[in-house]
Image (cartoon, helix red, strand yellow):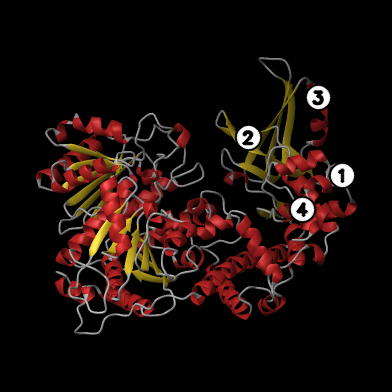
Amino acid sequence: MTERVDERLERAFDKRTATALGKLGLVTVGDLLGHYPRRYADPGALSDIAALEVGEHVTILARVEQATVRPMRNRKGALMEVVVTDGNSRLSLTFFGKHRGSLYNHEKRLVPGAKGLFTGTVGLYRGTRQLTHPDFTLMGEESDLDSDEALLEHATKPIPIYPAAAGIPSWKIQGALRVVLDTLTDDDVPDPVPDEVREREGMPGRTAALRSLHRPATLKEAYRAQHRMRFEEAFVLQAALAQRRARTAAEDATARPPLPPGKPSLLADFDASLPFVLTDGQRAVGDELAVELASPRPMHRLLQGEVGSGKTVVALRAMLQVVDAGGQAALLAPTEVLAAQHARTLRALLGPLAEGGTLFGAERTDASTRVALLTGSLGAKARKEALLQAASGEAGIVVGTHALLSEQVQFADLGLVVVDEQHRFGVEQRDALRAKGRVSPHLLVMTATPIPRTVAMTVFGDLETSSLTEVPAGRAGITTVAVPARNTRWTDRTWARVREEVDAGRRAYVVCARIHPDEETKAPAKDFDDVPEFLDPSGPGAEGAADRPPLRAVLEVVEELRSRPELAGVEIGMLHGQLPADQKEAEMARFASGEAPVLVATTVIEVGVDVPEATAMVIFDADRFGISQLHQLRGRVGRGTDPGLCLLVSDAEPGTPAFARLEAMTQTTDGFKLANLDLELRSEGDVLGAAQSGRASSLRLLRVVKDAGLIEEARTAAVDVVQASPDLTEFPELAQAIRAQLDEDQEEFLERA
C-alpha cells in the first residue's frame, strides 16, 4: 500500500476525531476508506421506524412532529420529549438537561417540520420505543455541513448511513471521508483488479468506485460501486486460493496406483469381505480417489458427505490402495473419542486384514497390515509401541489426534493424510503432518457437514470437492420432535420414551451444552473436545439470552436422571472432554455394551461415534446450537436397522429465528437442504469469519448466499491471472492485496481452507 493509504488518522484529523474513529477500529486512511456505508437514505424518503428493533444502534431520517419541554417530576432538571415520524410510525426522542435553558438549543432547532438524521440505540420505556440523547443533524443547517457543496450533497443526493458508535455518528464519518476523498488520487489507491479484468467485467477503477461508494450522485451509482468492490473481495480471495492450488499442483508426490489383478491386495480382499454393497456414490468417489492417488502429483480433495453416507469406508479404501502400493496412511481426528472410534471402526471393518505384517519388500507374502492408535494420553508403553509401528512401517494405518503432529512421530513412508472434520484444523497443522512424508503425501479431508457450493468455493477453495449424498440401504430413518422445555407433561413423556427404548434393548444419548452447572452460560466448555457451535451474542440461539435460564450441564443432568422415576434402575453414563482418556474409553464401552444404556454427554459425541444400538437422543437447549451441529448430533442415532428418535428440548418462542431452526430440523433430515438454510440464517461473519477462525471476517460486502454468480466469475478471472503469472510478479497490486489480507484475519480464514 502507498504512504497515503497507510497514513494514520492522527495525522489526517484532529486528535478528537481520530480517537472517535478509533472506536470503530479505524486506524489508517485505508481503514476509513474501507468503512463502507451500511445503507443509503433517500433525502426525499423517511426511514421505516416500524422496522427498528430494541437494542439496535440506528441512524434514521425522520421529521419532527412535535416537541415539548417540561420540568422533571421527581428530581431537579428539565426533560425534552420529541416525537419524530416517517409519516406512519412514530419514535420518541428524550433529552435531559440541568434546567430548561440548557435545552434551549435543542428546543430552537427541533421544531415541528424539521427533517434530519438521528442516531442512537433504540430503548424501551413503558412499552414505547425511544432514543435517549440521540446525536442529530438537521437538513439545511450548516453547523455539521461545512460547505455549500456538502449542504447540497446532503439535501439532494443519497445519504450514506455508516456503522457508527457513540461520539462518532454517521454524518461525522461522512464528513471525515469527504476530507479524505477531496485529496485522493489514483496513485494513492493501488487497484488489485488488473486493468484487463476490469475492462472485461466493465467495472470502474478502485478510486472511482470508492468515490461512488461514499459520495454517490445516485443510488444506481452506489450499487454499481458496491458490485465492483464485492468482485474485488471475491477476486483477491480466489486469487489467493488459486495460488495455493497452483503450488500444490507443482509439488511431487509418489504415485500409489492400485495393484494389478492377481497380486495379493488388501483392497481387493477388503472389497471381497464387505458384508454390504457399496452405494453408487461410494464407488464413483472411490474411482476419483483411485485415479488421483495413482498420479505423481499430490491429491488435494475434500470429501463431504451426508451423515451416515459411508465416508469412512471410502477413506479406508483409499488408505488400503496406498498401503498396497507400499506406503502408509495417517488419519487425523480432532478428539480422542473420535480417534479411538475411528481405530475401532477400521479394525472391525478390516477384521483379520488388520492383524498382519510389514509393508516392505517387492513381493508380499500376506495382504494384511496393522492399525495403530496414537493420542496424547496414551501410557508410555502403548505410546512407544505405536511410535515403533509407525516408524517401522508395521502399521500401514496410523490413527491419532494432534499427537500425530509431534516431532517424535515418524513414518516409514507416509503416502496419504486423511483429515477428519477439517474445520477443526488449520493449514499449518495439516502441513505439519504432510511434512512427515518423504515427498508430499496425498491429502483427503473429510467433513460430515454438507457444504453449500458457494461455501465450498470460498472456505474450501483450494481443494477439489467430492460429495456423498446417498445413505446406505437398510437405515430406518429418524423422527425429530421439538419439545417445549417448560411443559412438564412433554418432558415427562420424553423420559418415558427414553425408557421404552432402553427396555427394548436400545441406547439413548442425552446432550448438554456444558459440563459444569457453575460455568458461565455464554461460555462453551473449555476442553477442545467440548466446544459447541454456538453462539456468541450475535450468533444462532442468542436471542434473548440474557433473560433465559442457564444452560443445562452434564453433571447436574446426570444426577437429575438418576432420580427420575421413569429411569429407575437404569444405569446412567457420563462422557465429556475433561475426563481422562481411559475413562472416556470405559464410558463409551459401557454405553455400547448396554451396561449403561443412557449416556449424558457434551458435544464430544458430535461426529464419528457409531453405536448401531443407539436409537434415541435428547438435546437440551437445542436452540442454542446451529443447524449443522444439530444435524451432526442427530446423525449419531438411527445408524442401525431400528428407527431413530431425536427430541429437541428448548424454550425458543414461536416466531424467533431459533424456533425457525428447530422447526426446520423437524421437517427434513436432508443435510444439504439444512446446510443451505443454515447459510441463509447465519450472518456472513459466521460463515466466513468467527465460525472459521474465531474472529470477524474482513470481507465487507461479499455475500456468499447472494453472490454465488459473482464468486464464480471472480474464480474464473483469478485462475486466468494466476496461470499467467503464478507468483503474481506481473500483478504486484494483487500480490500486495493478498499479503495485506493474510496479515489480517484472512490468514486464519484461509488456514481453515
The x, y position of residue 101, in whole percent, is: 82, 23
Distance (Cα) linking label 3 and label 4 = 37 Å
Query: Which is nearer the eye, 636 or 544?
Result: 636
Is the residue marked by circle 4 packed among few (<14), some (14-19), or many (20+) residues within 10 Å?
A: many
Query: Which is nearer the eye, 417 or 304?
Result: 417
Residue pictured at 31% horizontal, 61% vertical? 390
Q: Amino acid at mark 1?
A: Glu
* Among numbered discs 2 and 1, the one appearing first in the sequence: 2
Residue pictured at 21% horizontal, 35% vertical? 492
Is residue 157 shown to the viewer in this render?
Answer: no
The x, y position of residue 171, in whole percent, is: 76, 46
Q: Amino acid at mark 2?
A: Gln
* Among numbered discs 4 and 2, the one appearing first in the sequence: 4
Q: Quadrant of residue 294?
A: bottom left
Query: Which is nearer the eye, 17 or 654?
Result: 17
Q: Amino acid at mark 3?
A: Ser
Q: Amino acid at mark 4?
A: Val
In this rendering, would 616 be left or right of 674?
Answer: left
Pointer 3: what residue? Answer: 102
Pointer 2: what residue? Answer: 130
Q: Quadrant of residue 142?
A: top right
Residue 29: mark: 4
Nearest-to-viewer mark from 3 and 4? 4
